[in-house]
Amino acid sequence: MTEKNATAYQVMWNRLLAVVEEQGQALIRAAFSPIVRDCGDISAGIFDIKARMLAQAVTGTPGHINTMAEAVKYLHEYFPTQAMKPGDIYMTNDPWIASGHLNDFLLMMPVFRKGHVVGFTSCTSHLVDLGGLGMGPEGADVYDEGLLVPPCKLVDGGEINAFLLEIVKANSREPIANEGDIYALIACCEIGATRLVEMMDEFGVDDLMPLADHIIDTSRRGTIEAIAEVPPGVYKNAMLIDGYEKQIELCGTLTVKADEMILDFAGTAGCSAKGINVPLNYATAYSVFAMRCIIGSDIPNNAGSLESFKVTGPPGCILNAQHPSPVAQRHTLGQMTPDLVYGCLHQAIPDRIPAEGASSMYDLPMRHAPEVARDGGRQFAVELTHNGGTGARPTKDGLSVTAFPSGVWGSQVEITEAVAPVLVRRREVRPGSGGAGKWRGGLGQSIEVTSANDAPFLVFLSVERISFPAEGRAGGMAGAPGRMRLDNKPDLPSKCELRIEPGETLYFDTPGGGGYGDPEQRERDLVAKDLEEGLITVETARDIYGLKEE
């Protein structure tokens, strides 16, 4: 390759990265649901004619992005390219193809230039309600959890499938939001296709494949070089988590070779009878994301940089749930897999791995109580996302109230109260929740929610870190566990369906991240500053950090 060609390829690669960001922003700006518009629960990407992902928007969640990378391959094989027309868009929300549960809709659009398909655009976002029992873990199978749309054509030559759209609306408690979000997904695909063609016109490129090969080959080489820095070997880790009916053990065996890393979930517990099971595509997405955060993190995410990471698991284990297992809350366990992976990697590269964090999102799917609809009251369905603290890093404190690994932004109080009849009485950082250490774990938050009118509403709880808090690393202490309760009643379990009557208040504390290193090694000035800012208690400063009162 000549220096001139290499420069041109890099410029076009950068343009693709800008295009997918514009795609993501178009989706967010056009969306109706707060979880998309204000929390960024999306993905957007561009693919070549072989359905290899060339670029993905930085805005988005790994559970959507990395599953999208595989789902487009499936749709590419399912629908013959030669039968596609300009303006066609394909769609599915099958959890085992798309993003692990019914509420995520994935679209794929062929990009035409000079009468030929030159690539594809794709995107995913969360639709707030697809009927069934709602976004809770109570379903006995996927059929309880709402409407499943198999791979189909959503838009045919520019004409939307109106009947399909009516079916989606008819099976939702939020039909207008669903319709608006589907149109936002369509706009996301279209803007990506338009910008890709414009780029090819500007650079006089008739065939995207030479650029695609450059992107993928360059990324693959860089990733293999990064993997080579990890000592080869077999590393095992197991962790206990809350589960639903009983505690669950997740097991991981990470095999590091010269040019690839293979994670196997053998030994992991079997499926639950409740909707916390995880399809392998979703467990893979977060496991690979965790590895990529450490290994070659400066290399853009695409088919080349993903190729060297492989994940397997015995069919029927809770991280490889088979159809028709209930999977509505698959993110609860799926987002714990990075801590499982990091327990393996810590054995190989201990100076690069953070402590455990809150990890699983503390989201609050809510909807009106059944009798509210019967009595003509206000109907609603909304999903609030909240986050705890991340684990401390080998050279820095953890981040407070930060979404890792999901990347989904926390729901805003004002938006919540505008779209649902709930009142957020309090939302503040939770003092003392970060694990002590040379580097302190990130803090969680405390939230109080009640009804804003005289009608009850339902909350579907499915969280982790209630019984098993985030562990510290290298001598660091555990973060505070999560805690949920209704008024002065006993603490709630981590997973249940909850009815909140008018006048009752839900108290919702998210977990803190684990600390890193011996707390006695923390600089006195940092301890004093934490105490002054209310991030730790007087007792913690004195008894754990040894700060003497002046």
Image: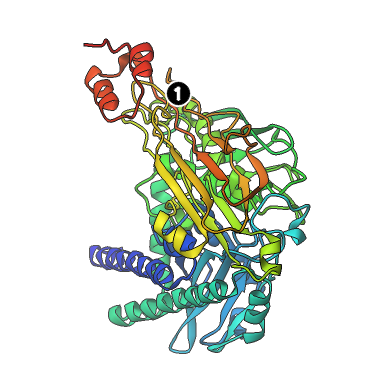
User: Which residue is nearer to you in this view: 303 or 469?
Assistant: 469
Look at 51% across and 72% down and name the residue there: 181
**Quarter occupied by the N terminus:** bottom left
**Can you say whether 388 is above or below 148 in the image?**
above
- Could you say where residue 128 lies in the image, as x and y percent from the top left? 57, 63
User: Which residue is nearer to you in this view: 437 or 444?
Assistant: 444
Visible in this render: residue 452? yes
Mark 1: secondary structure: loop
**Can you say whether 373 is above or below 287 in the image?**
below
Q: Does residue 194 appear to the left or right of 347 in the view shown?
A: left
- Could you say where residue 224 lies in the image, as x and y percent from the top left? 44, 44
- Which residue is tagged 1? 473
* Res 97 → quadrant: bottom right
* Res 468 → quadrant: top right
Visible in this render: residue 401? no
- Could you say where residue 327 lies in the image, as x and y percent from the top left? 68, 52
